Amino acid sequence: SVFCILPFATTAFSGDKGGVRTVAVITGDEIMGRLKQPSGLFFDEIKKRLYIADSGNGRLVSFDSEFKYMAELTNEAMTLPSSLVRNKEGHFFILDSGKGEIVFIDLEKKVVKSFPLSGVPSAKEQFVPGRMAIDADNRLYIIDKLNRRLIIVEQTGAFVREVTVKDKVFFGFTDVRVDDKGEIYAIDAIAGVVYIFDDKGGIVSRFGSRENKKDNFRFPTSLAVDKNGLIYIMDQHAGRILVFDRKGVFQYAISRPGVKEGELSYPSYIFIDKEGRIYTIDGNRIQVFQEEKG
């Protein structure tokens, strides 16, 4: 079976902004098996490696710069890895949804250890973790799905503060990112709203809602911010990536619904690296796109 497909040029979307080339499609092979419910990924800019949280298989898998399989990491401390980030020192933090704990990984020293969150109100009995992000100071931003809040902790797990929204229509956060300035971007998928917070947790702006159908999203599951400040929204129900500026003005769309290469079938996650490559998760496959703006 084929693990990684590297087409010469497959257009997933074309328009006045240019086209999108499919760089790679990753599903699995006979050596490492098939991906099963991958839920998060990260591209290491320094080592040029891709890491995927393969949740259904309870492991972390890595690939080289050409997206060829390298190795996998499994550990008893990691049962259901759902989100991963890397700090400035090159250490990984994985959110284990099964245990509700953070798993610390030092690949160089081959150290894997888990630790619970400490000092978080109601964390021990009522904390249900979602996705995670990290800022320039190595603080972790963790979605608490049950309590509809964003928890900020030190990389030791010590509680710093929480971010909440008091909107009348608010169902909780689905995904979160933090930019180099410390601004926080978060999605409420059910309400269909994107929030931008300052580094203190105050709302800077918000856009979207189910009331405005024009150039808007139907069910946003994930988001990413590129180096130019454009916000890429993964719309699961539409099977597309919608691109907005920070004022919420629609710019263009990428891909279309479907199961073929370059298409998206109920996509759940998006990540953008420093070179502008777009990584998506839909079902049990990873697709890597490169925009060719004209």
Image: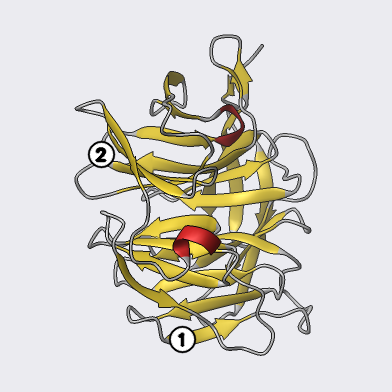
For label 1, the residue is 203
Is residue 138 among what the camera can see? yes
Residue 167 point in image, percent of width and height: 61, 88
Label 1: element kind? strand
* Amino acid type, callout 2: Ile
The numbered mark, 1 or 2, whose residue comes first in the sequence reads: 2
Residue 63 point in image, percent of width and height: 43, 26
Disc marking residue 46: 2
Q: Is residue 131 left or right of residue 146?
A: left
Residue 154 point in image, percent of width and height: 27, 61
| On screen, residue 82 above or below 261 | below
Viewer-closest of 107 and 67: 107
Residue in view at x 75 percent, y 51 percent: 256
Q: Is residue 5 left or right of residue 258?
A: left
Label 2: element kind? loop
* Amino acid type, callout 1: Ile
Disc tally is 2
